[in-house]
Image (cartoon, grey):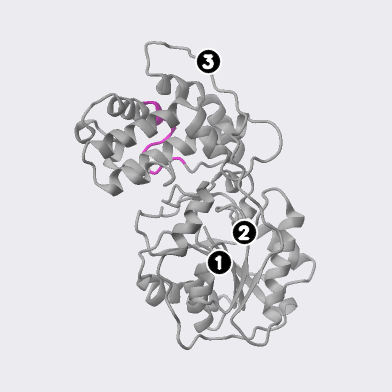
């Protein structure tokens, strides 16, 4: 079993919260939607506050930043890909291209990063930091987010 | 990610998840998910391949057209992690009076510095900067050779953090040195742990801390779990 297979097998056994009455939002047409990225790669702009080992908070990333430090505490995933091309985790240049082509309405002015290594009950991101981050994006007029896991 | 999708949806934002563990997406059932069987750490699949990344995004955004959910669709391509080590030349032994990993880390400094100058930033720096890497390896070498890990002076007192910094220093230097296409998932990890003196030293120190009574979190996260 290679490293990815081992991690996937382990992750498949973790508890998955059940949402009994999940929300469903119908967004505006994509060509009129403002799109943001939400990643769990624990990326943060160089000079911003680093992620702690059990950090359940989030960092906002300005649209024009590309100097993003990898703050994830898990050693169990490839880090070379994002070192070579940020977009393989955080597809900000792809969104800019889609906006220029008119496929999406606009790129959001700020994007969001969490750490993927969360406590199993995920209570903080569910009840505190997650809603706060979502409110920040709503204030920026975001209609759609693409979530990228690490 | 699936939990965050529910949270953001409840706040009035439509969401699409790029799933990396299908069972988790099935359990947590985010409104819309595109499952991508790609190397972990590469949710868009292929670094340096804008066309492929656009394909992933197009398939993900297409799920926004669904009238009801949850929607869970598989990306048709599977990308396996490359388990063959990156081809990257290591510096020759220079100062035999030093532990091999310390000598090696010193020899990689120019490559690391070139990477830093080109990129303008580094992910080294959790508890040590590049200047601290040889000294940190000297501490891990001593632990591997039998020194008591509790008194060895682990920088920052945090094994996970210092091992992150050492590995990242090596990986950023290696990506500066290596020629050829972008390495596959796990190729740089395999190079570091299988071919470098630093990787071998970390593995030995980890085993020594484990055998010396260190608690699970102290030693386990020094390397990927399967090692």
Q: Nearer the viewer, residue A79 or B212?
A: B212
Q: Circle 2 — which element?
A: loop
**In the drawing, does residue B94 fall left or right of residue B163?**
right
Residue A144 magenta: no
Few, some or many residues within 10 Å of mark 3 (<14, 14–19, 20+): few
Q: Marks 1 and 2: CB-CB under 8 Å?
A: yes
Which residue shows up at 38% across the image and 70% down it?
A122
Percent across and percent down for residue B204 are 35, 31
**In the drawing, does residue A19 fall left or right of residue A141?**
left
- Where residue B90 sits, quadrant-wise, is top right
Q: Nearer the viewer, residue A5 or A103?
A: A5
Which residue shows up at 45% across the image and 54% down it?
A48
- Give the Cα separation between the discs numbered 3 and 2: 39 Å
The magenta region covers B124-134
* Mark earlier in primary sequence (1, 3): 1
Q: Chain of mark 2?
A: B
Q: Is residue B84 above or below residue A125?
A: above
* Mark earlier in primary sequence (1, 2): 1
Quadrant into which the C terminus of chain B falls = top left
**Same chain for the residues at labels 1 and 2, yes or no?**
yes
- Give the Cα separation between the discs numbered 1 and 2: 8 Å
Percent across and percent down for residue A96 are 71, 62
Q: Which residue is mark 3?
A: B92
Q: Which residue is mark 1?
A: B22
Residue B128 magenta: yes
């Amino acid at each position: 079993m290679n490293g990815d297979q081992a991690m996937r097998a382990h992750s498949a056994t973790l508890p998955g919260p059940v949402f009994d009455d999940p929300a469903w939002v119908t967004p505006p047409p994509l060509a009129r939607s403002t799109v943001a990225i939400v990643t769990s790669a624990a990326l943060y702009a160089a000079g911003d506050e680093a992620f702690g080992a059990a950090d359940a908070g989030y960092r906002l990333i300005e649209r024009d930043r590309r100097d993003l430090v990898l703050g994830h505490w898990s050693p169990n995933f490839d880090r070379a890909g994002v070192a070579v091309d940020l977009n393989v985790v955080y597809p900000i240049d792809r969104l800019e291209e889609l906006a220029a082509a008119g496929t999406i309405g606009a790129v959001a002015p700020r994007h969001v990063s969490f750490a993927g290594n969360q406590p199993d009950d995920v209570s903080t991101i569910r009840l505190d930091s997650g809603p706060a981050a979502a409110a920040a994006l709503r204030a920026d007029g975001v209609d759609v987010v693409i979530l990228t896991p690490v | 990610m699936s939990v965050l999708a529910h949270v953001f949806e409840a706040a009035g934002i439509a969401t699409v998840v790029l799933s990396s563990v299908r069972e988790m997406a099935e359990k947590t059932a985010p409104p819309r998910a595109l499952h991508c069987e790609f190397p972990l750490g590469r949710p868009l699949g292929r670094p340096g391949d804008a066309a492929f990344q656009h394909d992933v995004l197009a398939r993900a955004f297409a799920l926004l057209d669904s009238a009801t959910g949850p929607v869970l669709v598989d990306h048709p391509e599977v990308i396996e992690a490359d388990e063959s080590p990156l081809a990257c030349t290591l510096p020759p032994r220079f100062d035999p009076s030093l532990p091999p990993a310390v000598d090696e880390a010193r020899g990689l400094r120019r490559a690391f510095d070139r990477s830093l100058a080109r990129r303008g930033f580094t992910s080294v720096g959790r508890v040590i900067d590049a200047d601290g890497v040889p000294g940190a390896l000297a501490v891990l070498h001593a632990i591997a050779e039998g020194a008591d890990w509790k008194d060895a002076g682990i920088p920052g007192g945090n094994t996970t953090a210092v091992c992150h910094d050492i590995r990242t220093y090596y990986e950023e230097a290696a990506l500066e040195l290596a020629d050829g296409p972008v390495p596959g998932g796990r190729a740089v990890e395999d190079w570091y742990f299988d071919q470098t003196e630093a990787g071998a030293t970390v593995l030995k120190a980890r085993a020594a801390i484990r055998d010396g009574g260190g608690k699970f979190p102290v030693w386990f996260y020094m390397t990927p779990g399967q090692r």
